[in-house]
Image (spheres, coloured by chain):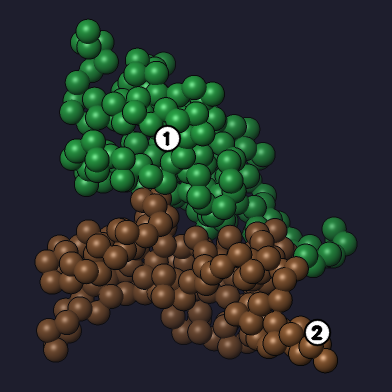
Amino acid sequence: MIDFDYIKARDISDAVGRMAQNPAAKFIAGGTNLIDLMKENVARPTRLIDITGLPLTEIEETDEGGLLIGALVPNSDLAYDERITKRYPLLSSAILAGASAQLRNMASTGGNLLQRTRCLYFYDTTTPCNKRERAQAAARLTASTA
Amino acid sequence: MQQRPQAGLTPKLEVTLRVNGVERRVSLRPWTTLLDALREYLDLTGTKKGCDHGQCGACTVLVDGRRIVSCLTLAVMKDGVEITTIEGLATNGKLHPLQKAFISHDGFQCGYCTPGQICSAVGLIAEGHAKTADEIRELMSGNVCRCGCYPNIVAAIEEVMQGVPSESRP
């Protein structure tokens, strides 16, 4: 893998502060997507800020009658939560239709929304990809048609 | 990949890994996965490296009783938590019921995926969401078997789930 340093955030303001200090840092929770991208050299953070100790693991009722899902609630806990299965069955079945039981146990709700699992070109760093590095493919296309 | 001289690498961190009830202090780089830590630092080679990308399930272990893939887990993030590998399932020299059932049902051929299959099945049963053979198949879909022993794997898990001991089978 790539070389990076690792720090465990003490609380939310510590995590946010450390991210502000280093734009090449990344938060890590479940790691199911980020570690994979780092193994493929697609993501190259110089620092990982571990946020798994932060108090973001609850599912709470809101005043408007909805639910507020903590960013660190694991996919499996969310999918099987009774409030979700009763009131938001589509969300539950969508989660259970993806990944595997092991990955759902690891993956967080916040990380799920931020994941970057994409096509083979995205993963292959020898091919240009606008999703991986903006304007790269367009530049290649311009060069070849010029 | 960024190439730096060895001396310039991020220093090792001291981590306490609690594996199968035994605490082990290890000094690891941040990028060492739990899978590599188990195999290369603790000599626990029962956990297998298959795809190393979280897709095959061969590296499945239990962390605080929940099944996860150790290849996508950084060891430094599991400091002090309870890790169970295939080596920790037998108690006092007696095989775990799932280990027995995999033998009696011939739930493997080459055996490479088996530690992951069994750890995953322990997690599956603890989760309690599978009630039927179809649900076992669905919730074991994170464990791939190149030899194609799926019918026997499902039969082994089903038997343990229903609490029928292997010895009493005809």
Q: Is residue B65 visible?
A: no
Q: Position of residue B72 (x, y in %)?
A: 54, 54
Q: Colour of chain A?
A: brown
In the rendered image, which residue does mark 2 sit on?
A: A144
Tag 1 near tag 2, CB within 8 Å? no
The answer to whether residue B97 is above or below residue B127 is above
* Side of A143 relative to A36 (left or right): right
Give whichever of A121, B45 is nearer the camera: A121
Judging from the image, mark 2 belongs to the subunit labelled A
Give whichever of B92, B118 is nearer the camera: B118
Residue at 70%, 87% in the rendered image: A138
Q: Secondary structure at mark 2?
A: helix
Q: Quadrant of residue B117?
A: top left
Q: Residue furthest front?
A: A145
Mark 1 Cα shell of 10 Å, populated few (<14), some (14-19), many (≥20)? many
* Side of A140 relative to B95 (left or right): right
Residue at 32%, 74% in the rendered image: A70
Q: Are marks 1 and 2 on the same chain?
A: no
Q: Which mark is residue B117?
A: 1
Q: Is residue A36 visible?
A: yes
Q: How many tags in the picture?
A: 2
Give whichever of A74, A36 is nearer the camera: A36
Residue at 63%, 44% in the rendered image: B36
Residue at 71%, 63% in the rendered image: A2
Judging from the image, mark 1 belongs to the subunit labelled B
**What quarter of the picture does the N terminus of chain A occupy?**
bottom right
Tell which chain the image draws in green.
Answer: B
Q: Amino acid type of disc 1?
A: Gln
Q: Position of residue B42 (x, y in %)?
A: 61, 37
Q: Position of residue B8 (x, y in %)?
A: 83, 65
